[in-house]
């Protein structure tokens, strides 16, 4: 460990701790590891200090400057985090704490160090998720409130809500009801576990933690995107999921199949008109304007060129979304106000990443479990 840089961080840390009515550290022993892990370290650290260390290491993994509570710990290393977590556990007495290897090995089995590393990976994962823009988000709304994979949420098409009626003075407001018809949204659980060797931790291979966090983010986005878009392009003939009425999402009976032919202004105009004229339960047109084009990768340029032919005001409203799960020449026009798909992240918006020591190797096992559901809905 770099003692000079560590001492500067420890000095800032001590200034923060001095703000609390707790005993302070005694005279520092000779080694950097023992400087943290000492019998005189009697502090019960505020939780925000723990998170300051975690955020600082995550910022280092992301190649970003530390901010907020993490500034005092900027540049912290993996062995230093291990030493700090070991100090908080007070289970270091009589053990080798002179080396980074000794600190990491003891912290893996005697402190919350594995969980702290999981929190670092989670922070990296969340940062990468915030940068992602999967195709399904442009045509799917999230369903909130699905708590377990055994619970099938019922998706009621918003268009089933009856129209408002005129109410004369002193008259009762008419009461309407929506039955339990609709589409089921039942979740499935998915998981992934990765083992990290202890050498990567001892050698402060923060880039490896960053790669794992980015990998988890990619795995989550790929899973959600694939499952959700399958509701649009899966099923018999690639016409999407079969809904509760026994008809697929894309069907002539629903009036959502346009004329065959290459992408053109005429075909796009036909699609926009069909979407705008869709009617709800009241029989009135929904008046939604198509503003998303979903295309296979081979049609990105053609779709962008088509949108460019519209007036500037019209073109700026359109978004071209491409995804590798789409094949052939089929493309879809979607109105943001009438998104045909629904998805649900069950129990947590961000899947939890757990951690534990691998007894056989001394390394770290990180596990991510994600319960996710997707379905389709018809507006008319």
Image (cartoon, rainbow, N blue to C red):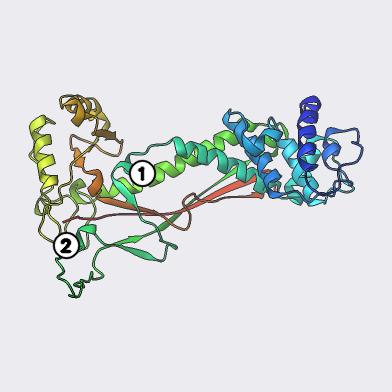
Question: Which x, y percent locates residue 319?
Answer: 26, 34
State left or right for residue 287 relative to residue 321: left
Dot 2 falls on a residue whose secondary structure is: loop
In the rendered image, the residue lying farthest to the front is 169
Question: Residue 163 got which mark?
Answer: 2
- In terms of image quadrants, where is residue 25? top right
State left or right for residue 163 relative to residue 197: left
Toward the viewer: 203 or 280?
Answer: 280
Q: In the image, what residue occupies the spot 31% across and 53% down?
A: 342
Q: Which residue is mark 1?
A: 225
Q: In the image, what residue occupies the spot 91% across and 41% down?
A: 26
Toward the viewer: 190 or 184?
Answer: 184
Above-or-below relation of 217 to 159? above
Question: Which x, y percent locates residue 172?
Answer: 20, 75
Dot 1 falls on a residue whose secondary structure is: helix
Which circle, 2 or 1, is nearer the viewer?
2
| Mark 2 crowd level (few <14, some 14–19, many ≥20, 10 Å Cα) | few
Question: Which x, y percent locates residue 50?
Answer: 69, 45
């Amino acid at each position: 460990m770099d003692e000079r840089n560590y001492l500067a961080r420890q000095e800032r840390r001590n200034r923060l701790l001095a703000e609390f009515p707790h005993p302070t550290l005694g005279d520092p022993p000779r080694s950097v590891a023992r400087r943290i892990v000492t019998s005189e370290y009697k502090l019960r650290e505020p939780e925000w200090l723990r998170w300051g260390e975690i955020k600082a290491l995550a910022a280092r993994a992301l190649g970003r400057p530390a901010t907020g509570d993490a500034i005092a710990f900027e540049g912290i290393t993996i062995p230093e985090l291990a030493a700090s977590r070991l100090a908080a556990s007070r289970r270091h007495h009589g053990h080798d704490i002179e080396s980074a290897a000794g600190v990491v090995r003891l912290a893996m089995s005697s402190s919350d160090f594995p969980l702290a590393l999981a929190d670092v990976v989670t922070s990296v994962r969340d940062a990468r998720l915030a940068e992602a823009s999967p195709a399904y988000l442009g045509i799917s709304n999230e369903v909130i409130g699905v708590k377990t994979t055994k619970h099938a949420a019922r998706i009621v098409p918003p268009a089933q809500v009856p129209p408002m009626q005129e109410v004369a003075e002193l008259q009762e407001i008419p009461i309407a009801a929506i039955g339990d018809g609709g589409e089921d949204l039942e979740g499935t659980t998915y998981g992934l576990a990765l083992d990290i060797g202890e050498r990567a931790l001892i050698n402060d291979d923060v880039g490896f933690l960053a790669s794992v966090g980015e990998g988890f983010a990619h795995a989550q986005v790929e899973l959600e995107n694939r499952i959700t878009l399958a509701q649009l392009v899966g099923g018999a003939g690639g016409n999407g999921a079969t809904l509760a009425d026994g008809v697929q999402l894309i069907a002539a009976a629903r009036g959502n199949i346009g004329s065959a032919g290459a992408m053109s202004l005429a075909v796009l105009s036909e699609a926009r008109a069909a979407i705008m004229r869709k009617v709800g339960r009241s029989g009135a047109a929904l008046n939604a304007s198509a503003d998303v084009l979903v295309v296979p990768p081979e049609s990105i340029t053609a779709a962008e060129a088509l949108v460019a032919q519209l007036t500037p005001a019209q073109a700026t409203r359109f978004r071209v979304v491409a995804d590798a799960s789409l094949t052939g020449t089929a493309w879809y026009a979607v109105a943001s106000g009438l998104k045909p798909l629904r998805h649900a992240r069950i129990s947590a918006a961000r899947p939890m990443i757990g951690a534990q020591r691998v007894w056989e190797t001394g390394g770290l096992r990180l596990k991510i479990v994600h319960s996710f559901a997707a379905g389709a809905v018809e507006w008319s």
